[in-house]
Amino acid sequence: MKIAITAASGQLGGEIVRAICQVIGQDNVVGLARTPAKAQHLGVEVRPGDYNNRQALEASLNGVDTVLLVSGMDAPDKRIEQHRNVIAAAKAAGVIKIVYTSVQGADEGTAFSPVIQSNRQTEVDIRNSGLKWAIGRNGIYIEPDVEYIETYKQAGEIANCAGEGKCGYTTRPELAYAYARMLTADKHNGKTYNLHGEAITQAELAEYLNLAFDTQLTYRAMTVDDYRHERIEALGDFMGTVIAGIYEGIREGKANNPSDFLAAAEREHQSWQDYFINLKRLNQ
C-alpha cells in the first residue's frame, strides 16, 4: 500500500505524514506539496502537489493506492475547483481510495459559512467520485489558543463572541492519529466522522489555560458585532470576518456536535485535563 498526503508541508499534513509512517513505514508514504522543498524534512518521498495543476497532480499520484486530501486554504469558490482537480487526478492515476479532511461549523448564517459550504460541496464530490472514501469533519484546533497565551496574559482575559456555547476542540496530533486509521482500515470506508474531543466553553478553556500556565484568565463575552470589528481591526477585513464567523458558530451551538473520534481512531480522544497537565509539565 502506498499512501499520499497532500499539503504535506503544512501543519496538519505534516502531522498526518508522521502518524501514517508509524503505521505503514516511511517507504510507503508520499508527501505532496506545492513547494516540495518545504516538506523534505519529513523523511518521505515528496512530489509536486499544487491543487491548481491537475496534470502535475496526476503524475504525482501515479502508483498511489490511497490519497489524503487536506482541505485547501484558498477562497471558498476557488477551493471547490482545486479539490476537484485532486479528485479527478486521483481517478485518472488509478487511486483506489480518497480520505478528506473537512470541518465542522454553521452551514449558513455566519461569515464562516461559505467555507463550510465549500467543504460540504467537496464532500459531495468525493461521495460521487466512484472511489472508495472516508471523510473527517475536524473540530477546531486548540493549539492557536495555546500559542496566543502571551496575548491572553497581557489582556488578563479571553474575549470573543462565543458566549456560553460549547466547542468541540481537537489537536493536530489527535487528528493525525485518527486519519492514519481511516486511511488504512476498510471498515471506515463510506463513513463521515466528527473528529474532536470533549466540547468545552470558553470559560472552561480559560480555566484549562490557567492550569497549564499558572495564569488568572477569565472569559468575557462580546457581541458578534463588537468582536467582528475588533478582529477586523487586528487581522484585516477578510480574516477578521472569518474568525468572528467561527466564534459566532460556536455561540449558536454549531461546534458542539456528537463526536465520532472513538469510532474513527479506535480509542478515545485525549482528555483536556491530560492535555493541559502535559503542557504544564512542559512549561516547568
Image: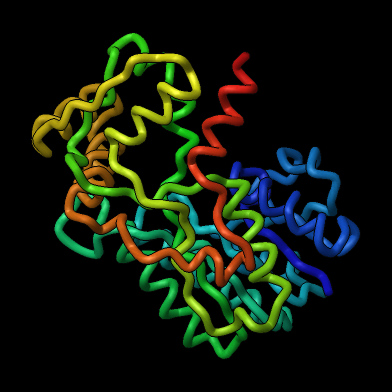
Of 225 and 275, the residue lying toward us: 275
Of 133 and 54, the residue lying toward us: 133
Residue in view at x 67 percent, y 53 percent: 16
Query: Dividing the image into 4 quarters, which one contains the N terminus?
Result: bottom right
Residue 145: x percent and y percent? 42, 31
Of 22 and 263, the residue lying toward us: 263
Residue 269's quadrant in the figure? bottom right
Residue 56 visible in the snapshot: no
Residue in view at x 48 percent, y 25 percent: 147
Residue 284: x percent and y percent? 62, 14
> Is 261 situated above or below 208?
below
> Is 186 situated above or below 89?
below
Residue in view at x 14 percent, y 58 percent: 109
- Label total for image: 0
Residue 22's quadrant in the figure? bottom right
Residue 281: x percent and y percent? 63, 22
